[in-house]
Image (tube, coloured by chain):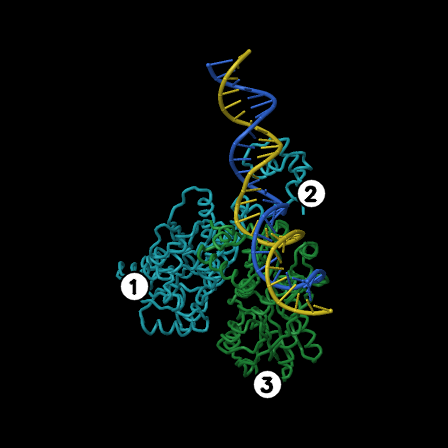
Chain colours: A cyan, B green, C yellow, D blue
Amino acid sequence: MVKITDVARHAGVSPSTVSYALSGKRPISEETRRRVEAAIRELGYRPHAGARALASSRSNVLALVVPLRTGIHVPVVMQFAVSVVTTARRHDHDVLLLTQEEGEEGLRRVADTALVDALIVMDVQLHDPRLPLLRALDRPSVMIGFPAAHEGLTCIDLDFKAAGEACVEHLARLGHRVVALVGSPPEVYVRQTAFAQRVVEGFTAAADRGGLASSVHPCEATPGTARAVAERLLREQPALTGVVVHNEPLLEPLVDAFEQLGLRVPGDLSVTAICPDETAAAVRVPITSVALPTAEVGERAVELLMRKLDGKSAPEATLLPPRITERASTAPRHAP
Amino acid sequence: MVKITDVARHAGVSPSTVSYALSGKRPISEETRRRVEAAIRELGYRPHAGARALASSRSNVLALVVPLRTGIHVPVVMQFAVSVVTTARRHDHDVLLLTQEEGEEGLRRVADTALVDALIVMDVQLHDPRLPLLRALDRPSVMIGFPAAHEGLTCIDLDFKAAGEACVEHLARLGHRVVALVGSPPEVYVRQTAFAQRVVEGFTAAADRGGLASSVHPCEATPGTARAVAERLLREQPALTGVVVHNEPLLEPLVDAFEQLGLRVPGDLSVTAICPDETAAAVRVPITSVALPTAEVGERAVELLMRKLDGKSAPEATLLPPRITERASTAPRHAP
DNA sequence: TTCCCCCGTCGAAGCGCTTCGACGTCACCC
DNA sequence: GGGTGACGTCGAAGCGCTTCGACGGGGGAA
């Protein structure tokens, strides 16, 4: 293994000079820097991560806790993860993968052993048991999602309440008076997963405000249930003309089911969704949707951490405003 | 931060004794061990990961490279990842997440900086550019998947060729004479992704051997294309009665499409698949399938690495034999 | 010209842990 | 009863890096 002293000798400088040339923490003459860089290249030097972490008390590793629970749409989780990893790399950090299963003990372990410098937590519940721990930890953290009480914590997410409202308001503007929310699986609400709850809030508030008749239906995320869901909706609300879907796997099958029941989309029924743009655009009838900006959320989560690690201030709450994209699935309501 | 010297003082022993009590590398008296453990508990001691890595030249971290490319079914990737993380934790290791995008440089970086002790690589191509690198690295690695030439490397995967064969043979045994393979997306084959290729090999070989008429159809993994795929299959092979699906997202929509075209499953058409058991069992008509044993593969990949890290021998090639489970989607062929 | 300060570099002191060799004690065997 | 190990513990020497204080030399200000 080639170490910093080898580089130093080869470049005719002291080890500390090599270190400063690498970190830029002290000025180094152009000439010296060049010689050091040449030596590094010729010897194929790579600083030892452990030694660096020990001496600098920075591991340059971030922990990412991913949810594994049922009802969570896996591809979306992966999009967050990829965005986090990619952004972390841009900031010269790596990402350690923790599963929800490891729980609080896992968080405490990687933080207390100084394995990681900071943490990102996903799948936040309204009353998340990890909150006290995150507050107590001596390392910065960011939550993707908003718990009920988040003072002293840094959170970022799409403004799901506003997203729910945006969908209803879009439908209301088109003249729809009876709307339904096809939500996430029941267990997601039982766990009080923050984002799902907030969609319901926004949906209901906007419908009430606009005087629309509305109903909320938690639904399994299995495509096979789409037909049954569609039938139930129409049975319970025969005048239904607007649907908001917050359930990725069900989106396409649900549209199919409605059409098989004789309702054209958007002719007889307008459909909007809250999901990644790619998902919405890929459906046979491209769906008007509020984008789930996974890439942006992941990126900004990392950037918030970087600010905190640099000792700079970071906003506690970042709510990304919903952005609705009109596609082919919504249209003005038929004259009755 | 509480360190090993604090624990030592509190327990009335030397730091090295604490270390040995922790690692078990030298015998420690019952009495001393108890005192050390008590001190650790009382002080809330956690060994510093960096210091440990530096002194022992072991980071207790594994790198996992996950594929991000199109055509790869994300939930399956996640299942591998979860299994790897869980198993790694059982062996007191953590997992660093690398994206395919980081490429060879990423592998070299984490290995050369001693950030990780060993590597797991997924989404192996037949002629994977990373092979020379993995051979040259001074750290052990395991590939999930089999490249064309894998001497000197450790690989593990389901025996996809045998899986393809098993599906055809199952259909042949039921009397089917005309079969089709609904494969992964075209780009997967273009990249020569190892497992997809091998399924085709096995499928074709078994069909030829049994004298069955067969055809292979790479297919996009978008549910919306199911109807078109079904129509094409029936147009090209009107006598078709057996289908093998190696394309998770298309499985359920395809079954629906066939039924909409007037073919009952399994009455008129028998369907088998290669996919995780949960996926096969969740379809409306539960699908006879060869299981994709993601949990087992991930677990064994980690265990192979552990053996290698312990200096023990590990088999170079581990091919898991296919296990077919009969469900409701296959039946003897109708008398013509 | 003198003083001061900044630039660029060096040496040395750790960071917190593991590990090696050494040493005293005790039991056991011939 | 002395030799021989095994056991249990200690002290010290690093692991490879960062960082702090120091210092010589040169330029600008007075």
The residue type indicated by label 1 comes to Arg
Q: Please name the residue shown 56% across and 73% down the image.
A: B231
Would you identify the image quadrant in which residue B271 lies? bottom right
Could you tell me how far apart the alpha carbons at marks 2 and 1 are, in whole angstroms? 72 Å
| Marks 2/1 same chain | yes
Which residue does the numbered mark 3 point to in the structure image?
B332
Q: Residue furthest bottom?
A: B335
Q: Chain of mark 2?
A: A
Q: Chain of mark 1?
A: A
Q: Please name the residue shown 64% across and 36% down the image.
A: A36
Q: Chain of mark 3?
A: B
Task: Provide residue B139's location: percent of width, then percent of height.
Answer: 66, 56
Q: Please name the residue shown 36% across and 50% down the image.
A: A152
The residue type indicated by label 2 comes to Leu
Q: In this view of the protein, which residue sits in the foreground, B40 or A203?
A: B40
Viewer-side label of 3, 2: 2
Q: Could you tell me how many numbered marks the image carries?
A: 3
Q: Residues at badges 2 and 1 in contact (C-beta under 8 Å)? A: no
Which residue does the numbered mark 1 point to in the structure image?
A177
- In the rendered image, the vertical position of residue B55 relative to residue A312, given as above or below: below
In the figure, is residue B190 to the left or right of C1?
A: right
Which mark is on residue A43?
Answer: 2
